[in-house]
């Protein structure tokens, strides 16, 4: 835990602490510690299920998502071209399904090494909660073949009721105190994730927020991009902050300073001026 000053802000990020956190994180991640590896083969489909779920349930969710037979009350709500919310009537809950099609030989190599995008999401979903990071609970994965013998991987997680993407919540917030609080809170969460060795290239749009009696929760999603050995260099920090500005809408000088302070702490830091400049000059996304 970073030391805090009188203002309640953490001290400057420690490179040594991050490297040590990444070493511990990557060891657990690549050894698959805590992530069930059980697989069961069905005709044209290999399935893996998390504790509390069955391989039959995972197979049924995938088959229904792919256009299989549906029972009364089953429904699928498409989110985009490769993900959807699936509800099975007898399961009494909704699931988030995301697919990863094979595009080139590298995907086969990654899969053979246990590091495909589905494998990364599966391991990260089991590992991150042990670090105090909120992420939707893993349900299962599947590796299925299409009629053209193309292999497609699927990741199934629990659905977060009432969750809203961070950038949508921020853009809907009124200007002033509410918006500034959201900016500061998120910058602090980004700092804590980075200090734990967690870096996602596409960060802002992969964070869900949910209101609770204790306050706003921040959930990391789309963990297929998770690479524990990806060190947070200055270039990647700038990319991260550019995303912040792109999805937050236009930022003013005070907001840029508050974000930099929440991330870097109150003391002097060599990256402060760079971060503030990136936040102020990056054009917002359409």
Image: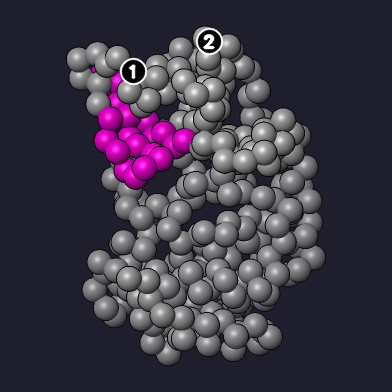
| Label located before the other in sequence (2 or 1) | 2
Q: Which residue is mark 2?
A: 42
Label 2 and label 1: CA atoms lie apart by 15 Å
**Image quarter hosting the N terminus:** bottom right
Residue at left offset 72%, top offset 36%: 109
Q: Does residue 87 belong to the magenta stretch?
A: yes
Which x, y percent locates residue 138?
50, 32
Which x, y percent locates residue 11?
65, 75
Q: Which range is magenta?
A: 76-99
User: Would you say residue 266 is visible in this rendering?
Assistant: yes
Classify mark 2: residues with Cα within 10 Å, few (<14), some (14-19) or many (20+).
few
Which x, y percent locates residue 207?
44, 55
Q: Which residue is mark 1?
A: 68
Q: Is residue 148 above or below residue 176?
A: above
Mark 2 element type: strand
Q: Nearer the viewer, residue 141 or 104?
A: 104
Secondary structure mainly formed by the magenta segment: strand
Residue at left offset 79%, top offset 65%: 16
Residue at left offset 61%, top offset 17%: 39
């Amino acid at each position: 835990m970073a030391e805090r000053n009188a203002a309640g802000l953490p001290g400057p990020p420690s490179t040594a602490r991050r490297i040590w956190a990444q070493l511990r994180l990557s060891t657990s991640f690549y050894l698959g510690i805590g992530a069930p590896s059980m697989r069961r083969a069905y005709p044209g489909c290999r399935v893996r299920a998390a504790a509390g779920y069955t391989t039959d349930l995972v197979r049924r969710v995938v088959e229904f998502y792919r256009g299989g037979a549906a029972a009364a009350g089953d429904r699928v709500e498409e989110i985009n071209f490769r993900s959807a919310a699936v509800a099975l009537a007898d399961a009494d809950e909704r699931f988030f399904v995301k697919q990863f099609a094979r595009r080139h030989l590298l995907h086969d190599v990654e899969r053979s090494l246990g590091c495909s995008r589905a494998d990364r999401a599966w391991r990260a979903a089991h590992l991150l909660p042990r670090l105090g990071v909120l992420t939707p609970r893993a349900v299962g994965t599947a590796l299925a073949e299409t009629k053209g013998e193309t292999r497609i991987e699927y990741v199934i997680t629990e659905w977060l009721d009432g969750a809203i993407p961070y950038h949508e919540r921020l853009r809907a917030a009124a200007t002033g105190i509410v918006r500034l609080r959201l900016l500061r809170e998120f910058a602090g969460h980004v700092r804590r994730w980075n200090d734990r060795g967690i870096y996602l290239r596409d960060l802002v749009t992969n964070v869900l927020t949910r209101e609770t009696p204790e306050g706003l929760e921040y959930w990391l999603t789309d963990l297929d991009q998770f690479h524990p050995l990806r060190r947070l260099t200055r270039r990647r920090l700038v990319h991260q902050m550019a995303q912040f500005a792109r999805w937050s809408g236009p930022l003013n000088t005070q907001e840029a300073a508050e974000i930099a302070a929440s991330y870097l702490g109150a003391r002097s830091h060599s990256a402060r001026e760079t971060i503030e400049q990136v936040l102020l000059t990056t054009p917002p996304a359409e």
